[in-house]
Image: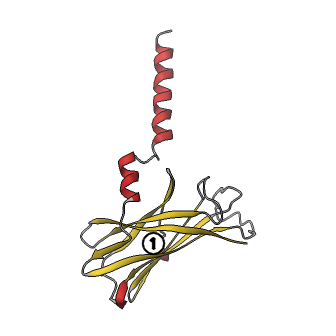
Amino acid sequence: MLPQKPALFAIFFSLLSVYVHANELAPDEFRKLLSAPTQLELMGRNLVLETSIWLDRMPRIFDPNRPSPECSKEGPLNVKVSIIATNLAEFPTGVKADRLWILKGNKWWGGSFSENESKISNNRLDTVARGCPPHFTEADMLVDLVVRIIDDKGNIYFLRAPDQKVQVVF
């Protein structure tokens, strides 16, 4: 029986290691996000990002029927993204944004956009993501924001907005 205990111990720690590292980006994936273009030509339209990133420190009223993320003292992180077709060109049909990453140095946080808060009007797609900020996010810091865009054929593109300031609301 004694030889099985070290084996079980090793299996436990290898599984724990997989769990802990599951959210890490491989270096080549991280470089890919950092090198994403700031403009994207898609379906004959030039797309750019406008962003608003803020930590929400507004006082909350506790509602036991509505779960709330367990965020740090910095408060929930909110990201509003507008993908804009320049020159007032109509926004391409069937294009959506589903994920985003906030990058600072070699650290990152990834999240998903809320489908029920995404809206296309004329030359833009507006969408929102909410979540807990990464431990490195602070008010007034500059971060890069990268959005994953998917076209109507399932092709994936990345679009980056560098040096976006994290705001705070009280």
In the image: residue 52, left or right of residue 118: right
Name the residue nearer the viewer: 29 or 128.
Answer: 29
Instruction: Check the image and report above or below for 155 versus 134.
Output: below
Quadrant of the drawing holding the C terminus:
bottom right
Name the residue nearer the viewer: 72 or 168.
Answer: 168
* Mark 1 crowdedness (10 Å alpha carbons): few <14, some 14-19, many ≥20: few
Instruction: Check the image and report above or below for 26 versus 16.
Output: below
In the displayed image of the protein, which residue is found farthest to the top? 2
Name the residue nearer the viewer: 23 or 142.
Answer: 142
* Colour scheme shown: secondary structure
Mark 1 — residue? 115
Q: Three-letter amino acid code at disc 1?
A: Glu
Give the x, y percent position of residue 135. Answer: 62, 52
Give the x, y percent position of residue 91. Answer: 34, 84
Give the x, y percent position of residue 163. Answer: 51, 67
Residue at image coords 38%, 87%: 123
Instruction: Check the image and report above or below for 107 versus 85.
Output: above
Residue at image coords 50%, 28%: 13
Q: Which secondary structure lies at badge 1?
A: helix
